[in-house]
Amino acid sequence: MRKRILAALLAATMIVSLCACGNGSGDTQQPSGDNTPATPPTITSLASFDDFKTIFKDKKYEVTDVDVEEYFVSMLCAQGAGLIEVKDRDTVQKGDVVQVDYTGYLNDKAFDGGAAKNQIIDVDKNCLFGEYTGEYGTTFIDKFTDGLVGAKKKTPVKHNVTFPKNYSSSTLAGKETTFEFNVDRIYVKATPDNVTDDYVKKYMEKQGFTTVEALLTDCREQLVATAVINYTIANSKVDIPDAYLQERLAIYENAIVEISGATSIEEFVRSQYQATVSSIRPYWLSYIKTSIITEVVLAEMMKSKDVKADETKLQEYIEEIMSVNSNFTDADDIYFELGYGNIEKGKERLSNQLAITDYILEKYRASQSVTE
């Protein structure tokens, strides 16, 4: 079964569900102890998800060639093939990605936090580049990477950089500094224009791709399906009774306590975040609410088109996720993350999303065939 962009949804869920915190205010009370199940949420309006032209008129959901190329790179990166080392030149050019060591100096003295080794940097975008994800990471201060263009491998080069006046460190704010770079390797990103069918086959055959065109087509289709689902979720209306939201919060917090071995949710939050439960709960509630809306909309999409879930495909996808993500040891781990502690809801959500994705792709391919 082909890798799907749904994996990104799982990764994002893990990050926000277990790590989200901040300085929010207000205290959210837990359910009073009444064992009567809360009234479940209801959908009052489901957005149309068959009219692709209307959906993609909204620039927020438009799938561009740039989007497709970036996803193409990320698919190859996941197989360790997203960067191609340059062997026929030793000078950095615009558009390159480099592996580099650097050290920052203020008044000729190296300053704390200004040095790093083996950084993978996208020179044009002035940021870190995920060698195995294809994603852009930390952005550097303005013009930080300007001095890399023209630098030669293994030859130190210096470049002056002025820190912003509002920079967090008062020692560096507004100061002109000097960075010394030493480029170890030069890469170009694998793109549809510089890789061959043989290259795709070498790294992606196990995922079902043997040509550049096939991988590009799948990238576009997966982005389209994700955009359509996101559009539908954002433009549908769901009523969530507060008691139900609180019930789901309680399920999530109880699960956290059980898994972590903490004596209470207060102890867990205090030890993990050095914060109070009242400051964390608003963030958890926000994410849980989003998860509930997603569950309800996906279920209504299934019902509206009489789409049936496919248990075999679900199991195949679960195995696929676990083969590339060591954070999950079994299916319930994945369902737990998607359902914020409610394994049953998490399984339903993933199963529905897989089925709706297939439905959307079938309709999208038909629409493209008619257009052509």
Image (spheres, helix red, strand yellow):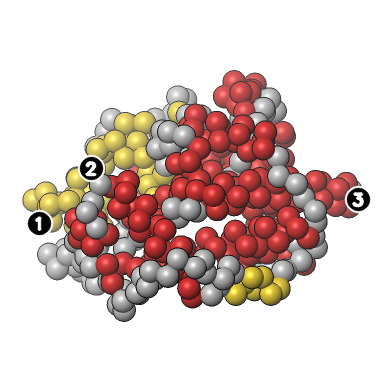
Q: Secondary structure at mark 1?
A: loop
Q: Position of residue 215 (x, y in %)?
A: 67, 35
Residue under label 2, please give it.
116
- Name which of mark 2 and mark 1 comes first in the sequence: 1
Disc 3 residue type (three-letter): Val
> From this viewpoint, which residue is outermost toward the front?
35
**How far apart in space, not on screen, are marks 2 and 1 (Cα)?**
19 Å
Going by the numbered disc 2, the residue's amino acid type is Ala
Q: Which residue is mark 1?
A: 107
On residue 370, the disc is 3
Circles 3 and 1 in contact, beta carbons < 8 Å: no
Name the amino acid, label 1: Asn
Question: Marks 2/3: CA distance?
Answer: 53 Å
Q: Residue at x 46, y 48 (%)?
A: 336
Q: Nearer the viewer, mark 2 or mark 1?
A: 2
The image shows residue 65 at horizontal and vertical percentages of: 66, 50
Nearest to the eye among marks 3 and 1: give it: 3
Left or right: 236 as drawn, with respect to 189: right
Residue placed at 48% from the left, 73% from the top?
A: 243
The answer to which quarter of the image holds residue 149 is: top left
Q: CA distance from mark 3 to mark 1?
A: 66 Å
Q: Is residue 113 above or below residue 300?
A: above
**Residue 136 coordinates in the image, percent (x, y):** 44, 49
Location of residue 354 by image quarter: top right
